[in-house]
Image: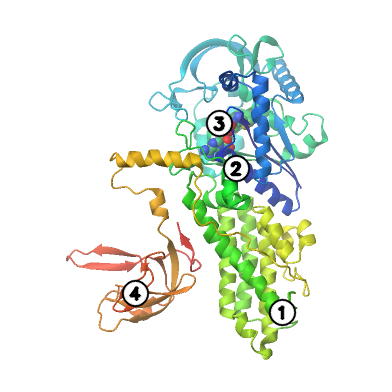
């Protein structure tokens, strides 16, 4: 099946930062995922190079627009390989074929009388490169650029967008997946509940020359959005190239919320006027902030993707952004958060599981995957492992398909947690001591190898380099290159006898957070603000992040001798530890067994009644009407693997 994945084309008035990197990583991951599902994928990104903003930036840099756009477009293009992003096509709006197509389309829409000439007065925001309606302003300013738009009256050409309003509303209602997540679909519908104005599509050459001339009036250039949106067509050779016929119907655009309106309103109505089908789906994500403040040049806290790659490695960066942002909502970048994900999720959970499993296969069965005993007896543990890993693959697939990347990764990490527990419960090192347990040892190790292979396959789109390393270490290099997701569904994918290689650590631990220089500057500003007394009583996101909250399963509980208040709990989080909790007056010990509670896992150990306590169980304290108090331990609403982080 064809799939066509696009990113916005980025303005060349700024160097690539975390926001651009995120959208492009998402599009790359989704493209790789669809390929893994067997689709024929075309993935396109590019740069938007005309318009006032660019002309101004060039002037500021003391360069001609041409030289300036060449330089910045090259910087964007050079960034992608560092992030393991592999587009099939990188388009520039200054490409000759794009200019020609934009002019052909304008002429056609003009000839059919969907473009007319008129005078217009409106409030123009240079940052947005469009006129804003009164309703869009917040306290008289553009909410994105925080400046008051300028009143402008001029003669211009207009596209009869209003003619297509009713059609668009009906189309969105009839196609619930057209704009996702739903919040953005609702936002667009709400916007469309008011009458739509026609779209101004030109700028007089007296005001701007850096643009595509209107084919029917040389005194005007094309308004940048009419130029930019058409990139999605020219990139696949509209109208005559077979790629256009093949991919257009399968177009999926990925954008952030800032450019929702042009993509959800201008673009479908333009396509309708050209008698083309609308794109398939529009995927809209939120904004990356830095340490909970807006990322901006003027604040000096712009995070550069290449600095992050140098500090943590490309796959950590890709994993981090997908895991940390719920697609659709805003997220906050912090050096602490990426460090924690690197060391906990990647070095610890995944990296240790992998190297430990391979080391056991090496040590106990001579470095090749053992045969699972045919007709062997599987224990409930084995069955749980099989069904959980199969369920993980199904969940992963469904979540990736709906752009819920963080959920897909959560599902994979639950499976990783389960495998770590499977090793502990089945203790291959014990089995290896007794020859009568060889069959069992073989079964356990072959299940491990097989589950790791499945994890390798699903991680491929997100962490291509790491997955390739894992495949090689598992002796599956060839299979990996031609793998499809269905290979992760079948049990028996990694044949007995496969020779396992050696693997160095997949993710060497990073000891100290490496702060991008820009973030350090921004932190200094934040500190100054805090020192000045602003924001008193509040803690920063970093302070909150320093507390390691985990889900812990209570496996044993007993009263502490000579204490009315204390219970000694043994919990798994996921490793076993003892916690002494002051809840004896409120809970019978046996009632707690099996409960999954939330604990502070990185509290300094303390001795209570001579018993070392490694952590603290969180509980809600209720003050009753009679003045007494009641404690209720905090639990999780659904079953969650012990050891899961509470964030
Ligand atoms: N040139 C237009 C888009 C034309 S598409 C036909 C444009 N360019 S832009 O350089 O401003 O890029 C905007 C896009 O960059 C956002 O939609 C998003 O994909 C990405 N991001 C820029 N800053 C971002 C964040 N802070 N957070 C997340 N993504 C952001 O608009």
Residue, disc 4: 580
Residue, disc 1: 365
Residue 369 lies left or right of residue 203; in this view the side is: right
Question: In the figure, residue 269 lies in which quadrant?
Answer: top right
Pinpoint residue 494: horizontal percent, then vertical percent.
75, 69
Reading the chain from its start, which is encountered first: label 1 or label 3? Answer: 3
Pinpoint residue 500: horizontal percent, then vertical percent.
74, 70
Q: Which mark is residue 77?
A: none
Query: Decide: marks 1, 3 in contact (CB < 8 A)?
Result: no
Report whether the residue tagged 3 is closer than 8 Å to ligand 1: no
Q: Nearer the viewer, residue 166 or 132?
A: 132
Decide: is 628 above or below 284.
Answer: below
| Count of picture labels | 4
Q: Quadrant of the C terminus?
A: bottom left
Reading the chain from its start, which is encountered first: label 4 or label 1? Answer: 1
Residue, disc 2: 306
Pinpoint residue 1: horizontal percent, then vertical percent.
76, 48
Judged from the image, the secondary structure of the residue bearing numbered disc 2 is helix
Distance, label 4 to label 2, CA atoms, is 46 Å
Nearer the observer: mark 4 or 1; the answer is 1
Nearer the observer: mark 4 or 2; the answer is 2
Mark 3: few/some/many CA within 10 Å (<14, 14-19, 20+): some
Distance, label 3 to label 4, CA atoms, is 55 Å
Q: Nearer the viewer, residue 324 or 42?
A: 324
Query: Decide: marks 4, 2 in contact (CB < 8 A)?
Result: no
Residue 545 lies left or right of residue 450; in this view the side is: left
Judged from the image, the secondary structure of the residue bearing numbered disc 1 is helix
Q: Which mark is residue 261?
A: 3
Residue at 29% over, 76% down? 566
């Amino acid at each position: 099946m064809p799939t066509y994945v696009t990113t916005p084309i980025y303005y060349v008035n700024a160097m690539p930062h975390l926001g651009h990197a995120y959208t492009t990583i998402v599009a790359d991951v989704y493209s790789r995922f669809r390929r893994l599902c067997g689709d024929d994928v075309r993935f396109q990104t590019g740069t938007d190079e005309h318009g006032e903003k660019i002309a101004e930036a060039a002037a500021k840099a003391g360069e001609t627009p041409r030289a300036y756009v060449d330089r910045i477009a090259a910087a964007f293009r050079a960034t992608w390989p560092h992030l393991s992003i592999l587009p099939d096509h990188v388009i520039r709006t200054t490409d000759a074929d794009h200019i020609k197509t934009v002019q052909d389309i304008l002429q056609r829409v003009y000839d059919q009388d969907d473009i007319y000439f008129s005078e217009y007065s409106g409030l123009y925001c240079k940052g947005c490169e469009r006129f804003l309606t009164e309703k869009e302003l917040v306290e008289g300013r553009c909410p994105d650029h925080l400046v008051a738009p300028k009143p402008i009256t001029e003669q211009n050409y207009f596209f009869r967008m209003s003619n297509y309003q009713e059609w668009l509303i009906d189309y969105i209602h009839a196609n619930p997946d057209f704009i996702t997540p739903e919040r953005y679909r609702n936002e667009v519908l709400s916007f469309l509940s008011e009458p739509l104005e026609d779209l101004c599509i030109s700028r007089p050459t007296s005001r701007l020359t850096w643009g595509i001339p209107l084919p029917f009036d040389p005194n005007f250039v094309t308004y940048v959005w009419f130029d930019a949106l058409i990139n999605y067509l020219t990139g696949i050779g509209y109208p005559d190239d077979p790629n256009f016929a093949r991919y257009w119907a399968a177009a999926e655009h990925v954008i952030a919320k800032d450019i929702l309106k042009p993509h959800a309103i201008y673009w479908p109505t333009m396509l309708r006027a050209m008698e083309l089908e609308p794109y398939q789906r529009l995927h809209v994500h939120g904004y990356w902030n830095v340490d909970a403040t807006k990322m901006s040049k003027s604040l000096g806290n712009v995070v550069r993707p290449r600095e992050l790659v140098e500090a943590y490695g490309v796959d950590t960066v890709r994993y981090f952004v997908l895991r940390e942002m719920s697609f659709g909502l805003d997220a906050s970048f912090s050096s602490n958060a990426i460090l924690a994900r690197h060391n906990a999720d990647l070095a610890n959970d995944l990296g240790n599981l992998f190297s430990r499993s391979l080391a056991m296969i090496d040590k106990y069965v001579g470095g090749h995957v053992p045969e699972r005993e045919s007709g062997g007896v599987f224990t409930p543990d084995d069955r749980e492992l099989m069904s959980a890993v199969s369920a993980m693959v199904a969940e992963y697939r469904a979540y990736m398909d709906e752009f819920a990347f963080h959920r897909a990764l959560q599902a994979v990490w639950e499976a990783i947690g389960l495998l770590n527990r499977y090793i502990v419960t089945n203790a291959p090192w014990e089995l290896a001591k007794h020859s009568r347990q060889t069959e069992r040892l073989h079964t356990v190790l072959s299940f491990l190898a097989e589950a790791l292979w499945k994890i390798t396959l699903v991680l491929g789109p997100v962490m291509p380099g790491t997955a390739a390393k894992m495949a090689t270490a598992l002796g599956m290099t060839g299979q990996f290159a031609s793998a499809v997701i269905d290979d992760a569904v079948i049990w028996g994918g990694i044949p007995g006898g496969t020779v396992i290689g050696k693997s160095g650590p997949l993710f060497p631990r990073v000891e100290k957070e490496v702060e991008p220089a820009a973030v350090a500057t921004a932190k200094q500003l934040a500190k100054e603000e805090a020192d000045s007394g602003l924001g008193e009583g509040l803690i920063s996101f970093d302070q909150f992040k320093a507390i390691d909250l985990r889900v812990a399963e209570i496996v044993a509980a007993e009263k502490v001798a000579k204490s009315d208040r204390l219970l000694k709990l043994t919990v798994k989080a996921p490793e076993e530890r003892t916690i002494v909790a002051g809840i004896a007056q409120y809970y019978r010990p046996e009632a707690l067994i099996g409960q999954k509670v939330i604990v502070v896992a990185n509290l300094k150990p303390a001795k209570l009644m001579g018993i070392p306590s490694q952590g603290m169980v969180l509980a809600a304290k209720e003050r009753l009407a009679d003045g007494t108090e009641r404690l209720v331990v905090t639990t999780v609403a659904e079953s969650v693997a012990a050891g899961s982080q509470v964030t």
